[in-house]
Image (spheres, rainbow, N blue to C red):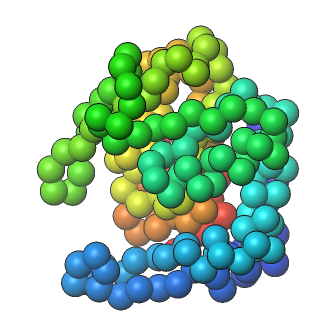
């Protein structure tokens, strides 16, 4: 599957709209804040347009990871005319749900999905704002596959390459707009 390359103009636009916040949420962490990008209608529209060009005609639904992944998944699904699948933190969806636990840097977390919106073989693009260590994205992909979906690709606005998330996701197709 061929992906639309990220044009230099879009790459520069995204980087210009991502705000660096040092020492947040704790000392030593450089947080990449996408709030200014989301607030800029032209930039946000360009991001959604690029993702629609990259995945149009190849998917049955867009899955978004709570919470910022929802902000990208919903408008992308609308543009593509497909449904949205919410990958939520544990305890946020009514039963029945499928759930999985995964390791974080300091402990574990759990996510869940409702199987009601999924069909066996559904072609899914899994979307989130940032690819860091790959733990959450990998768990979400495995959970959707457990539900019978086929992950076409994982798409991220930002990839933090030094944290190794791409390698943690194995041979999955990964699409990142900006890499730091």
Q: Is residue 17 left or right of residue 52?
A: left
Q: Is residue 35 left or right of residue 125?
A: left
Residue positioned 45% across, 48% down in the render: 66
Residue 112 position (above or below residue 115): below
Nearer the observer, 7 or 93:
93
The image shows residue 71 at horizontal and vertical percentages of: 59, 56
**Residue 172 makes an appearance in the image:** no
Residue 23, quarter of the rendered image: bottom left
**Residue 60 makes an appearance in the image:** yes
Q: Residue furthest top?
A: 120
Q: Is residue 9 left or right of residue 128?
A: right
Residue 120, quarter of the rendered image: top right
Residue positioned 46% across, 24% down in the render: 114
Nearer the observer, 24 or 29:
24
Q: How many marks?
A: 0
The image shows residue 106 at horizontal and vertical percentages of: 16, 56
The quadrant in which the N terminus is found is top right
Q: Is residue 73 left or right of residue 136?
A: right
Residue 25 position (above or below residue 175): below
Nearer the observer, 158 or 86:
86
The image shows residue 116 at horizontal and vertical percentages of: 53, 17
Residue positioned 81% across, 46% down in the render: 79
Nearer the observer, 90 or 4:
90
Q: Residue furthest front?
A: 94
Residue positioned 60% across, 80% down in the render: 36
The image shows residue 83 at horizontal and vertical percentages of: 69, 32
Q: Residue furthest left?
A: 107
């Amino acid at each position: 599957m061929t992906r639309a390359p990220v044009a230099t103009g879009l790459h520069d636009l995204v980087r210009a709209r991502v705000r660096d916040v040092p020492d947040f949420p704790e000392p030593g962490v450089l947080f990449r804040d996408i709030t200014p990008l989301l607030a800029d209608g032209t930039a946000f529209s360009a991001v959604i347009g690029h993702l629609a060009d990259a995945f149009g005609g190849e998917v049955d639904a867009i899955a978004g990871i709570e919470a910022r992944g929802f902000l990208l998944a919903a408008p992308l699904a609308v543009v593509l005319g497909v449904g949205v699948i919410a990958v939520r933190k544990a305890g946020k969806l009514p039963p029945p749900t499928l759930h999985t636990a995964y390791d974080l840097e300091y402990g574990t977390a759990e996510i869940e999905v409702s199987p009601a919106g999924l069909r066996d073989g559904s072609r899914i693009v899994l979307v989130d704002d940032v690819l860091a260590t790959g733990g959450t994205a990998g768990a979400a992909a495995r959970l959707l596959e457990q539900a019978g979906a086929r992950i076409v690709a994982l798409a991220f606005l930002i990839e933090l390459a030094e944290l190794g998330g791409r390698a943690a996701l194995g041979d999955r197709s990964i699409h990142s707009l900006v890499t730091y």
